[in-house]
């Protein structure tokens, strides 16, 4: 099986949320429901030196986050109807809306907070890697729309050869539990996964 995944260049992401808007437009999402969200992570403060002068260690960066197409997806394990499943062809994790009962178990299980409830339809929704585009050889709309070229999509092993193997920085959890199919290029001030002291804001 070819496992597809995403590359996220945090050093280039400007937090403009074009990826999120393009996704919502393509998927015709209700206002406030975004299948790709941008997380702003910030922290630090001013500190006094021994000689009375001051220094700062303030940082802020953005992480564009859709579904991480995990190799061991928690959402699939807990879905009581089998609506969540992992495609054998490309490893994308998708939802069969005909089977979904909107119970929210997937949202509670996902360590990344990806699945969300569409309150109008009473169905869970999530990024599906733009399946209708990628199965025809195209790219997800988030990748194509990013003005900073901070996103890429493809075979995860190829992305790892090209960009490295980092799959977690703060505020994301460690990738050990679900084995996310993502590669992250951290920015200079990025903090390790599990770091405390910063604040995360999802948009």
Image: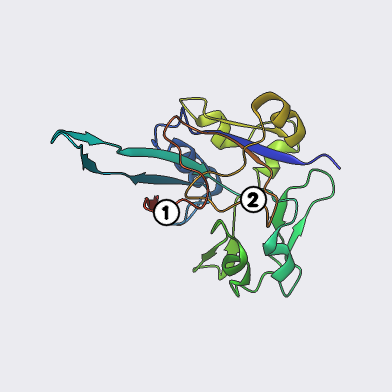
Q: Quadrant of residue 107?
A: bottom right
The percent position of residue 138, horizontal first and vertical second, equals 69, 31
Q: Can residue 174 be seen here? A: yes
State the residue position of label 2. Answer: 175
Q: Looking at this view, is 71 or 80 the one in front?
A: 71
Q: Quadrant of residue 5?
A: top right
- Residue at 67%, 69% in the rendered image: 100
Secondary structure category for the residue under label 1:
loop
How many numbered discs sit on the rendered protein? 2
Residue that protrudes farthest toward the front in the picture: 50
State the residue position of label 1. Answer: 196
The percent position of residue 44, horizontal first and vertical second, equals 30, 44
- Residue at 46%, 56% in the rendered image: 33
Q: Give the Cα separation between the discs numbered 2 and 1.
A: 17 Å
Q: Which badge, 2 or 1, is on the more N-terminal residue? A: 2
Q: Viewed as shown, does residue 62 lie left or right of 3?
A: left
């Amino acid at each position: 099986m070819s496992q597809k995944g995403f590359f996220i260049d945090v050093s280039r992401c400007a937090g403009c949320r074009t990826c999120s808007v393009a996704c919502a437009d393509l998927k015709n999402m209700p206002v406030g429901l975004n299948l790709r969200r941008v997380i702003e992570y910030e922290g630090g403060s001013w500190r006094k030196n021994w000689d009375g002068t001051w220094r700062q260690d303030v940082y802020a960066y953005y992480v564009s986050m859709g579904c991480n197409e995990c190799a061991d997806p928690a959402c699939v394990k807990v879905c009581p109807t089998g609506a969540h499943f992992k495609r054998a062809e490309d490893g994308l994790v998708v939802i069969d809306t005909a089977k979904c009962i909107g119970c929210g178990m997937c949202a509670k299980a996902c360590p990344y907070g990806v699945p969300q409830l569409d309150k109008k339809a009473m169905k869970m929704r999530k990024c599906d890697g733009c399946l209708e585009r990628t199965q025809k050889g195209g790219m997800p709309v988030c990748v194509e729309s990013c003005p900073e070229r901070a996103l890429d999509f493809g075979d995860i092993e190829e992305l790892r050869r090209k960009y490295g193997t980092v799959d977690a920085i703060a505020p994301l959890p460690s990738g050990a539990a679900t084995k996310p199919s993502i590669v992250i290029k951290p920015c200079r001030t990025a903090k390790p996964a599990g770091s405390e002291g910063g604040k995360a804001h999802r948009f």
